[in-house]
Image: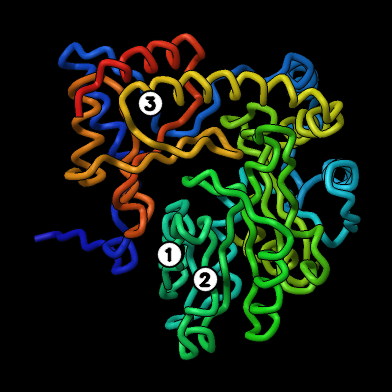
Amino acid sequence: MFRIEKSRRIKEVPPYLFAEIDKIKAEQIARGVDVIDLTIGDPDLPTPSDIISQMKKSIEDPKNHAYPSYIGMPEMRQAVAKWYQNRFKVKLDPETEVIILIGSKEGIAHLPLAFIDNGDYGLVPDPGYPVYKTSILFAGGIPHFLPLLKENHYLPDLDKVPQAIRNKSKLLFLNYPNNPTSATAGKEFFEQAIAFCRNHNIIICHDAAYTEIYFNEKKPLSFLEVEGAKEVGIEFHSLSKTFNMAGWRIGFAVGNSEIIAALGQIKTNIDSGCFKAIQEAGITALQKDLSETKKLREIYQERKDLIMSGLKKTGLEVEPPAATFYVWLPVPDGYTSMEFATHLLNQTGILTTPGNGFGPSGEGFIRMSLTASTERIKEAANRLASLSL
């Protein structure tokens, strides 16, 4: 009898968190519940019209119908370098220090394949974006969780990594502004991380997808602004959040040329690059006035204030996020993350993400996203006000 046997690596990976949440949402809708979905960070706002116009023009150009470059069009890489110079005052060589990705998730998922062998460790923030862990598992490595605790401002304590694991670690994933905690990191922490990784030959992979979503004019840093960063690591960025281009699947990685080249070598064997028409639209996005994202931040600020007001009326204490479009909420005493998310859904129809879905240290929290429409966020705030704990 024919039998299908999954590989060990796929058996080791739990179902993708948001795929499971989609099932729960569908079940509630089928029951007639008016669900307000505050789970996935999928921007609801439209892509700016000038980016769409460029895409319409580019998609009709026959030269864009051929295979693209594996590493990205020169013009797109130049646009990335110029954007980094304007935003962070970081100088990049577009030839060797920039690579274009099919969304930053693709690059994050593929990078460990270039550096991790069976039995090597990868250091993973906990809680954190689930792809960090799974990318290490797929490469045959072992994830070692770094707890992000409230009392440490959601920064990992690298001194607590056991020496034996340091010696066998190849990668350190960092993510600031942070998903899911919304924490930011300063220059001092990045200096510590750079010194730690230089001393132990560990590559830093900094996921900087949320640097343009911040509040109170406190601009988050690029890891590459800190001295020595380019020696030990790379930074991932995405057009998904900054320009509402989540479905377009375009991002980039920048930094150490040897690491970029290794990621490029993986890509040449796995994919054929990002569609050139999307890259041309991406160039239009990166050439936009940096102040335009202020309008985006103002919308998220309004939504954040609405949710915070609703939570306050319930008696729940929560720290306002400094950045990202997430609220990281401690659950009330007597509940687990899943129990409170279920209670919230049953009482209010608001669907949130249990914190333990991001790692063991996420237990005791839920995450709310601000990427529903402002009207739906208002409705959510009103429903929260009537929540009984």
Q: Distance between the residues labelled 2 and 3?
A: 30 Å
Q: Reply above or below: 345 against 322.
A: above
Colour style of the rendered protein structure: rainbow
When asked about the image quadrant of residue 57, the answer is top right
- Disc 3 target residue: 311
Query: Does residue 273 show up?
Result: no
Residue shown at the point (65%, 78%) measured from the top left: 197
Report crowding for label 1: few under 14, some 14 to 19, many 20 or more residues within 10 A (C-alpha).
many
**Viewer-nearest of discs 2 and 3:** 3
Q: Do the residues labelled 1 and 3 touch (CB within 8 Å)?
A: no
Camera-side residue: 239 or 1?
239
Report crowding for label 3: few under 14, some 14 to 19, many 20 or more residues within 10 A (C-alpha).
many
Q: How far apart are marks 1 and 3 (CA)?
A: 26 Å
Question: Which amino acid type is shown beneath numbered disc 3?
Answer: Leu
- Disc 2 target residue: 157
Q: Reply above or below: 172 against 21.
A: below
Q: Are marks 1 and 2 in contact (CB under 8 Å)?
A: yes
**Viewer-nearest of discs 1 and 3:** 3
Q: How far apart are marks 1 and 2 (CA)?
A: 8 Å
Question: Which amino acid type is shown beneath numbered disc 2?
Answer: Asp
On-image quarter of the C terminus = top left
Question: Which amino acid type is shown beneath numbered disc 1?
Answer: Pro
When asked about the image quadrant of residue 331, the answer is top left
- Disc 1 target residue: 147
Query: Does residue 188 show up?
Result: yes
